[in-house]
Amino acid sequence: MHKYIILLFLIISCNKKEKLIYEDYNDEDFLPVQGIITKVFKKGAINNFIKKDLHFIYNLEKENPSKGYEINSPYMLNEGEPVIILVHKNNDSISFFGSRGIIQKEILLNYLEKCDLDKRIYYGVEY
């Protein structure tokens, strides 16, 4: 009986798919786009190193911007900070945090103006 339980556990464990990381892809498959950090969840410190879950939006020119996240990020970012998001050329639901910064100023300013007019923190995004 114990053998069957162990076998079942192994089968379930082997079938579990993990989310791919940026290094699993080819660099040329991604385009940098403008994004904004929408939430930062701090986790406990491990060896005096605080990990964070980052949530961000990108494709700011769309009526409903795309949402993405990065788990256990080492980056020190704040909500509302403009960032560069790396988006897969063939599947825009695959995205990764790239760096801080502004690369599409016009798109960012237009998006922030829509947020002000609509009186929402982030236009087109429901949390």
Image: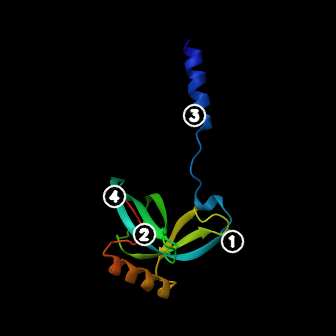
Numbered tag placed on residue 42 in the rendering:
4
- How far is mark 3 from mark 2, CA to CA? 38 Å
For badge 4, the amino acid type reads Lys
Q: Is residue 29 left or right of residue 86?
A: right
Numbered tag placed on residue 127 in the rendering:
none
- Specify which label sits upstream in the sequence, 3 or 4: 3
The residue lying toward the viewer, choosing from 104 and 18, is: 104
- Specify which label sits upstream in the sequence, 1 or 4: 1
Numbered tag placed on residue 124 in the rendering:
2
Say how the picture is coloured: rainbow
Mark 2: few/some/many CA within 10 Å (<14, 14-19, 20+) = some
Q: Is residue 67 left or right of residue 12?
A: left
Q: Position of residue 93 (x, y in %)?
A: 57, 62
For badge 2, the amino acid type reads Gly
Residue located beneath label 3 in the image: 13
For badge 3, the amino acid type reads Ser
